[in-house]
Amino acid sequence: MTAISDAALDSGIRGASPSAGSPEFEPIGVTARYPPPSAGIDPDQSKGWITRLMPVIRTHGGLLTAGLVTGIIGLAVQVAVPAAAQKAVDSAASGDRQTLWITTVVIIGLGAARLVFGGANRYLLFKLGWNVETDMRAIMYEHLTKLSFSYYDRTQSGQVISRANSDIRSVQLLLSFGPIISVSVLSFVLAFGYMIYVHPLLALVALAPLPGVYWFGVRFRDQVFPLSWVSQARMADLATIVDENVSGTRVVKSFAAEERQIALLGRSAQRIQWANTRIVDSRSRWNPLIESLPRLGTAMVLLYGGWLAIQGEVSVGTLLAFSAYVIMLQLPFRMAGFVLMQGQRASAAAQRIYEILDEVPEIADSPGAVDIAHPHGRVDFQDVRFGYNPETPVLDGFSLCIEPGERVALVGRTGSGKSTVARLLDRFYDADGGSVLIDGLDVRDVTLRSLRHTVGLVLDEPFLFSASLHDNIAYGRPGAARSEVVAAARAAQAHIFIQELPDGYDTVVGERGYTLSGGQRQRIAIARTLLANPKVLILDDATSAIDVTVEEAIHQALQVLMADRTTIIIAHRLSTISLAERVVMLADGRVANMGSHAELLATDPRYVEILARYGNGGDDGGPPAAGNGAPGENRP
Ligand SMILES: Nc1ncnc2c1ncn2[C@@H]1O[C@H](COP(=O)(O)OP(=O)(O)OP(=O)(O)O)[C@@H](O)[C@H]1O
Ligand SMILES: [Mg+2]
């Protein structure tokens, strides 16, 4: 089973060795193609939400200014139209043809200006809203990538998704409409000033219903706001259910639990429906009322103004202008309700977004963190204590020193903390007590990038991205050449089956690589880590789904690869354990015993029990042939 030529391995895997450039280690990942936003959220949590957002808005200051200026001009133009119409009607009544002509032309000009400025205003402000939305997405995603595993342990994906979608959308809506509507307050001032100037009493009569419009608007908002809030929160719940159903569809189907899931989803959907129906109910009660009130204003203007006109106190044109203003002016009043509501909504949405952004990554580079430049691969756990919650420590007094190039198997019952040891070494979590050292450096004092480049972790349930197999394998080194990818795949015994796929290395695998079998996915994951060429390799149950003969071949390849690499093998299978020079037994959060497989087998009944538990037939005697766990040894 030596399909791997050492030359290929040398040119391929070893080719990944750190080159003598700076940075000294080869960084995992690529540089961003789209530069991140140049500003972030103001970190001061005591400030208001808009103030905190200001640094981001300010980067689009030009858009905001231009949007406001065009908005103001557009509204001034709009307010001027009824006044011009008034002049036109009055000049028609008095037979002044020249003025009629001029005012008509002016009205056409005003209409054209309104078209241009109104359009520009909408365009600019919406662009502002979308730009800020894009920035917030980028800021949020960047932050999410920094957050620690402990955050993801306690967060539902649906909540994050809903914050990234509907909450950011709420903020965008306010940023787009808020300035438009705020500017419309100015149109109110202009028009009202003009009306007072023409006829104060008629102006007051015309505006009499507007406080009613505002008051009903506020009542409406008070009813709808809590409901829309409920509706949004329930949307997030629904998103979580849908997400779990899609990702867990195999479990659902295998238990024929579709109906239960449908019922669960149905109930969640009904809860949204209830909230939304109540919203529509309020809307259909209040909106017609709010819309009819200005008509009352028109009627009053026509009645009182008509009487004034009969008296000869105002002209017919004034009457016309005033009734136009009544309709025009109710808009800011109605919209004020909308802006206040959207403002509250956006504020709550922003708080929920900030909740994520204010989450301090627990695991981050400490000030003065250094790169592990030329790792040797010595691993040292010193009296480590750790628990996912402090009351129940998983590891307590765990001490283990692994020499560079050594191969150590970590065995223990399920839940004994083997994976936890791996997570501490890769600094997914920080130890509560004691220290974890690599080459004598505390993992908290080195940069995460260099640490994760040094320590490669292969998990038992590998995640594959929706991308080609080549890209999946080259995930840690996107620039890797095809020959390097092939060499890694060969070492992981993945080359042969990949070649048999219709598109070979260019085959795109599904979201979780479901088109591949579990064992095939594990082999891709091993290849992916091998290509990144870490100095310390942790295989956490990484070959559990691979059949014994293939595993054997992988082991042969790994032995070549492991030559100058520290390797920690977490496994249950005897054949896998046998790959290690030293077996470390984990129990009660600490190292319970260690030695060679043969020693432990002969002296420690607990070891025999652990092996037997996983169907290794641990008591059948003889140690496995060094490094070549024969298939027969794996029989129950
Ligand atoms: N993210 C987590 N949050 C809280 N508790 C956890 C978390 N991960 C693991 N645990 C708990 O910590 C303990 C050790 O888990 P760990 O995954 O290290 O066990 P393991 O030895 O790798 O087991 P296995 O052999 O089944 O993989 C278990 O009791 C587990 O329930
Ligand atoms: Mg585990």
Image (spheres, rainbow, N blue to C red):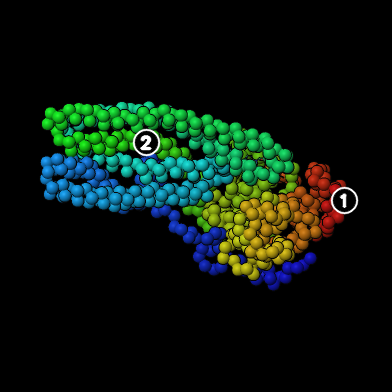
Side of 296 where 263 appears, left or right: right
Mark 2 lies on a secondary structure that is: helix
Reply above or below: 491 against 519. Answer: below
Image x and y of residue 240, in percent: 58, 40
Image coords of residue 506 (percent x, y):
64, 64
> Which corner quadrant of the image does residue 181 belong to?
top left
Query: Which residue occupies the foreground of this view, 521 or 83?
Result: 83
* Residue occupying image coordinates x 14% and y 33%: 314
Q: Position of residue 21 (x, y in %)?
A: 52, 67
Q: Can residue 490 be seen in the rendering of this structure?
A: no
Say left or right for 411 vs 612: left
Q: Mark 1 — residue?
A: 621
Residue type at mark 2 is: Phe
The quadrant in which the N terminus is found is: bottom right
What residue sits right under mark 2 in the picture? Answer: 338
> Spatial distance from mark 1 to mark 2, Cα to Cα?
79 Å
Disc nearest the viewer among 1 and 2: 2
